[in-house]
Image: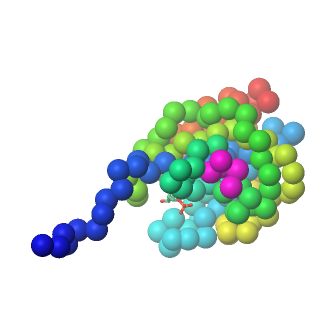
Amino acid sequence: MSNPLPPVSSAPLIVVGAAIVNDRGQVLAAQRAEPPALAGCWEFPGGKVEPGESDVSAIVRECREELGVEVELVERLGPDLPLQRDFGVLRVWIARLAEGEPTALEHAALRWLDATELDDVAWLPADAPLIDELRVRLAEW
Ligand code: C5P
């Protein structure tokens, strides 16, 4: 008898994000272009960790694909946070630019925000709890 349900992956979904901080203590915010429910909201650029990939490699890959830059990771920002639309977690690392200037290859827009500007954009729900800690880190940068 065939099973009507598709195979279910046992691997937990991990979405990674990069809080890229520049030499002026500003962080890069990226505005989503899609899907329609999220378009216009701002996020730390990133995406899903692929099977067999580490979270660190996934961030480096996503920053290449989405922004056209090379990043080096500095340290984690906050704990893993629950994703609302997907079952899984968001894991964000603070990063520095190693090469290139970010370009919105997949996003609607990019903005560099200093510590006083972090509330100027509407962050995705999963990213928003990290903003208070980020404000402290940017002020000390
Ligand atoms: O970018 P991508 O579509 O691969 O992201 C997968 C899911 O993770 C989406 O639902 C998106 O809203 C969420 N996400 C998030 N915060 C980020 C990056 C992605 O909540 N910084």
Q: Estimate the x, y position of residue 113 in percent, counting from the top left.
A: 75, 47
Residue 55 placement, left or right of 3:
right
Q: Toward the viewer: 108 or 64? A: 64
Q: Residue lying furthest top in this view?
A: 140
**Does residue 57 sit above or below 1 in this rendering?**
above
Q: Residue at x 70, y 50 (%)?
A: 60
Q: Inspect the magenta stretch and tell me whether residue 89 lies in it.
A: no
Q: Toward the viewer: 65 or 1? A: 1
Residue 37 placement, left or right of 27:
left
Q: Estimate the x, y position of residue 75 in percent, counting from the top left.
A: 68, 32
Please say whether residue 128 is visible from this viewpoint.
no
Q: Residue at x 66, y 57 (%)?
A: 62
**Does residue 87 sit above or below 72 in this rendering?**
below
Q: Residue at x 47, y 68 (%)?
A: 37
Image colouring:
rainbow
**Does residue 3 sit above or below 17 in this rendering?**
below
Please say whether residue 59 is visible from this viewpoint.
yes
Q: Residue lying furthest left in this view?
A: 1
Q: Residue at x 12, y 73 (%)?
A: 1
What secondary structure characterizes most of the magenta part? helix
Q: Which residues are magenta?
A: 57-61
